Amino acid sequence: MTGPLAPPSRVAFLGTPQIAVPLLRTVVDSGVEVPLVVSRADARRGRRAHATPSPVKAAAVELGLAVTDDLDAVLDADVDLAIVVAYGRIIPASLLDRVPMVNVHFSLLPRWRGAAPVERAILAGDQVTGVCLMEVAQALDAGAVYSSAEVPITSTTTAVQLRDQLVEASVPLLQAALADGFPQPQPQVGEPVYADKLTADDLRIDWERSAVELDRVVRVGGAWTTVAGKRLKIWVASPVSADPTGPQAAPGALHGTQVTCGDGVLELTLVQSEGKGRTDAAAWRAGARLDDGVILGD
């Protein structure tokens, strides 16, 4: 564990996705010199035929900053510090030994170390998460913490909303550290919980589960089930209570835009059929020509 860090005058920035862009702008706006930005190499995204730059690279170019995908270039940049935000690559010990690095991590460590802290917090039903400024260590997200801030998670918070809130909470932490220095970091306390990257199976709706649990899957983004063997994505939904006086239906049974769950009912609001765009669930239901009571996910 390192000690406190003085306010830096020259900072390298390492990041790749959109969530890192506001923090790059925060560093630039602080008046600290940013001689180098490191981002992942250009890549094909979605169905685009040509490789495109990462959001961080695009922002760096817009800001007139030098940008590269060569991580070793940090060694020649003559920086006091590197700020890391969702960079997406393991940083080797040979670099950590020579350049102090601070990571902006979107959870309250040691809970949700790893690649998907935002999504895992929602899936677990956490009521609070947060952001940490932490030293980059060789072990995954195991470094000591300089500062942190809590962010609540409500029963309707989506992953998109939570990312925005976490970035908003991280900005004043980073501004203060760049202006006044990073205080003595404190070791993480408690048993680590890991946030593995989500798979397609994590997002597949299991109608045997409760409506409350499935609502969390939907709020993460990309939840899906099947209808007559074809994939149906569920983008917006909400849990409702089952009518105890109504007919008892099997999990997965579709009645109107409501689907019976292992406990409760999930009301579909916005869906997307395979090969089509997103549409209102009522409009999809009207055009799908499905029998009432058809089982989803079979």
Image (cartoon, rainbow, N blue to C red):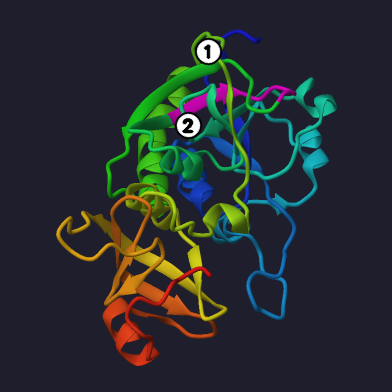
Marked residue nearer the N-terminal end (1 or 2): 2
Q: CA distance from mark 1 to mark 2?
A: 14 Å
Q: Quadrant of residue 76?
A: top right
Q: Secondary structure at mark 2?
A: loop
In front: label 1 or label 2: 1
Residue 107 shows which numbered tag?
A: 2
Q: Position of residue 211 (x, y in %)?
A: 34, 53
Q: Quadrant of residue 94?
A: top right
Q: Amino acid at mark 2?
A: Ser
| Residue 45 painted magenta | no
The residue beneath circle 1 is: 190
Q: Secondary structure at mark 1?
A: loop
Q: Quadrant of the N terminus?
A: top right
Whether residue 28 is visible to the viewer of this picture, yes or no, is no
Asked whether 125 or 153 is in front, the reply is 125
Q: Residue furthest right?
A: 94
Q: Position of residue 45 (x, y in %)?
A: 65, 69
Q: Position of residue 146 (x, y in %)?
A: 50, 17
Question: Taking 175 as reference, is 144 left or right?
Answer: right
Question: Taking 176 as reference, is 226 left or right?
Answer: right
- What segment carries the magenta color? 131-139
